[in-house]
Amino acid sequence: MSSISQDIRTRWETGGMVVRLILVNVAVFLLVATLGLIETLGIPLPNVGGAFGLATSSDPAVLLRRPWSIVTHMFVHLGVWHLVMNLLVLWWMGGMFRNYFGDRRTLSTYLMGGFSGWLVYFLLLNLVPGFGGGGFALGASAAVMALMVATAVYAPDYTIRMFLLGPVKLKWVALAYVLIDYAALSRGANVGGHLGHLGGAAYGLLYMRGIQGGRDLGGPLERLLDVLATWWPGSGGAKRPRKTKRKKRGKGMHAVHRKLDKDGKTLRAQTDEEFNAEKKVRQERIDRILDKISKLGYDQLTKEEKDFLFRHGSNV
């Protein structure tokens, strides 16, 4: 068991945001399953309903009693198939999104996509009589749809190989998912779920259009998460990080940066000019690789390009 826990810890620390989101979803699934087993064994638990209070509701009275569910619902799955399908798409589309935009934007887009899905679900079930109401909503589908649509808007001609269909451009995959949810609204089954999916997709579209136009809809949430991270255990407790004063450089003095090899050992010192020049060259290469992905697809990269993007892409 210690080996398993160590492997999970290693994956959490080194796997990136998509891996962390998958691990959280799996952990919540196991928690809910365990609580359900306890109930099955006849051990009484508080009767709060809706995945033990983690699922959200379109009923304002219920929502007032569990406001946290606006966030927790996007990590809750009751069925194995529901969990597996969402996490497969999260791994697939979330991984692509992360390669382009890094960990911070992956997390903020997941959370904002899930919130947007909840908002559309809550408003339309309460304002449009034909959609009905009641019940609970849960699952990562809206958050995953946001990542998928955002990636498809950014790299619409990215080509993926699908079973039985062969090469398909990403824009058609995302459009198919959206149309399936839209068409399902008329059947009356799981209307709230399909509305949530469409809400997440809408956020993905608006978010990426904003990025392309110089506006970051996820920026405020990212800054909030940065503040909250300073309160996380292991980051110095509840204290904000102290600003350190930089010593003024004397005339003729330059900052020195360490140039490291792949093992973290210092090769030699670098001046400001050398460091900035190398950083510029590295960023230009990342941009060229991302352009190649958007035009030809990830599979067309060379092994060396994939390795380079893996090492440096999360800083994009």
Image (spheres, rainbow, N blue to C red):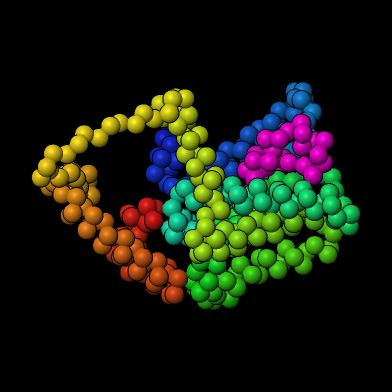
| Place of residue 44 in the rendered image (x, y in percent of width and height, measured from the top left) | 77, 23
Q: Which residues are magenta?
A: 55-83
Q: 207 left or right of 189? A: left
Q: In front: 29, or 227?
A: 227
The quarter of the displayed image where residue 289 is located: bottom left
Q: Residue at x 77, y 34 (%)?
A: 64
The residue lying furthest to the front in this view is 251
Quarter in which the C terminus is drawn: bottom left
| Count of numbered circles in the view | 0
The percent position of residue 105, horizontal first and vertical second, equals 49, 51
Image side of residue 314 versus residue 196, left or right: left
Residue 282: x and y in percent read 28, 60
- Against 316, residue 43 (above or below) is above
Q: Is residue 285 above or below residue 62?
A: below
Which residue is drawn at the image coordinates 55% and 67% (left, top)?
153
The quarter of the picture where residue 173 lies is bottom right
Q: Which x, y percent locates residue 52? A: 72, 33
Residue 75 is inside the magenta segment: yes
In which quadrant of the rendered view does residue 299 lie?
Answer: bottom left
Residue at the farthest left position: 252
Task: Report if residue 251 is visible in the image.
Answer: yes
Q: Residue at x 43, y 43 (%)?
A: 11
Q: Residue at x 43, y 28 (%)?
A: 240
Q: In the rendered structure, does residue 2 fall within the stretch colored magenta? A: no
Q: Is residue 40 visible?
A: no
